Image (tube, rainbow, N blue to C red):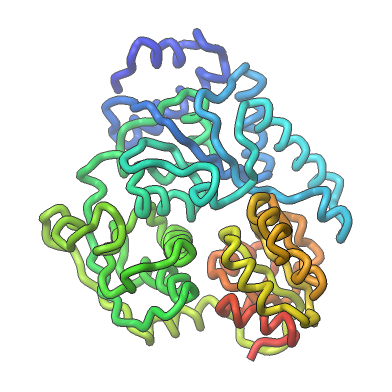
Amino acid sequence: MYLTGEEREMLDGKWGEGVATAMEVLVAIGEAFGAERMVEISRAHVALSNQEADLWFVEKLVRGGARCRVSPTVNPAFNLEYFQQVTTIDPDDEEIVKRTREAYRAIGATLTYNCTPYLEKNIPRFGEIAAYSESSATPYMNSVYGARSNRESAQSALCAAVTGRTPLYGCLLEENRRGQVWVKVEADIRDDFDYQLLGYCVPSKAGPGVPVFTGLPANPSPEALMNLGAQLNTAGAVPLYHIVGVTPEAPTLEAAFGGREPERQVVITNKDLEETQKAISLEGGRIDFALLGCPHLTITQVGEIARLLEGKDLAVELWICTSFLTKELARRMGFLDIIRRAGGHVVEDTCIDQPCWRHLYGKKGVTESPKCAYYTKRRNMGFVVRSLRQCVEAAVKGEVE
């Protein structure tokens, strides 16, 4: 693998032990994928996990003197100070949150603690080279903005941020961004929730490859595109998709496939979406809580929840995960007061896959996100999956119809 003089100096330790470790990781990845050289990045997002292995790695780089050339935004862990007020936090979990904060601050990350940076702080231009981890962020970057990122791990994205480089392979190359599978949507796509089901359904039916969608509404909302990418990348490791007439690299069907014939064609029907929902959801009935915001909810979604809750009281716990910025907007717009008066929680900096939810383990909840239902199985949390509106209505009644 060709390295420039500066990249060779990084690998050889001239810029410090931490930088050398980061470059060593990137070279190994590049060689594994057959990359011929490195390219510079101008953006990064690190899906920090707040878990021991992730923390061990970033602390190792910090001890080696590494500091990010490109300051990455970072994923949420959990809001320690908020949860200490409402539940009991294990001392080990408290310690790891504090160490994670300190390590990423020391290495020069931008501490957004948000899994949708592509809607707020970290917005690329078309064609920009980046290193993004996080399942909803990578497909949104690639597909909606036309920027270029591989499906990075938290560690490889951090190494790219430290060195300002990433190996040139995969979705960074023009030939790998062409569509492969034609997904003809004949199902009725009526709202943002249908994109959740569509995204979760497609990988199992279409198999691997870059999907090209036809038959979708002409003007999908940011939330719809966020939902679609999050579920595609959760169910099928899909970092890039095209929607003909919507996403920038697919003005026509021919352009989406780069002039080639599709490798496969699949049709998605209403029955497919119904079967997907049945497969990922528990049956209705009494619930113990509602957990929304995987990925983090936007101000539009928080506003919808507030309007549904105005003048009502919740029968069960309602948790809404969002970004710091969205929570502040919700406060200014009066949404926060409405949700709090109903008994709900709006919490920033927090992911559904964290130990702060121990008081909900073994209980049955409702969520709008198949991704949430999937990731929390390992924490013994079961979910009925419904639309955002149905989730809020269920939280008011204490049961799902």
Q: Position of residue 67 (x, y in %)?
A: 58, 22
Task: Check the picture and name the quadrant holding the N terminus.
Answer: top left
Q: Position of residue 46 (x, y in %)?
A: 55, 40
Q: Residue at x 74, y 71 (%)?
A: 318
Q: Is residue 189 above or below residue 40?
A: below
Q: Residue furthest front?
A: 333
Can residue 218 be seen by looking at this rendering?
A: yes
Can residue 353 be seen by looking at this rendering?
A: no
Q: Which one is nearer the viewer's eye here, 171 or 44?
A: 44
Q: Which one is nearer the viewer's eye here, 342 or 86?
A: 342
Q: Which one is nearer the viewer's eye here, 95 or 368?
A: 368
Q: Is residue 17 above or below residue 26?
A: above
Instruction: Tell how many labels.
Output: 0
Q: Quadrant of residue 285?
A: bottom right
Q: Is residue 325 above or below residue 318?
A: above
Horizontal side, residue 268 vs residue 175: left or right: right
Q: Residue furthest top?
A: 14
Horizontal side, residue 338 vs residue 384: left or right: right
Q: Position of residue 139 (x, y in %)?
A: 40, 53
Task: Check the picture and name the quadrant holding the C terminus.
Answer: bottom right
Q: Position of residue 201 (x, y in %)?
A: 40, 72
Q: Which one is nearer the viewer's eye here, 48 or 51?
A: 48
Q: Is residue 185 above or below residue 251?
A: below
Q: Residue furthest bottom?
A: 401
Horizontal side, residue 146 vs residue 252: left or right: right
Q: Residue at x 34, y 26 (%)?
A: 38
Q: Residue at x 86, y 53 (%)?
A: 84
Q: Residue at x 38, y 56 (%)?
A: 238
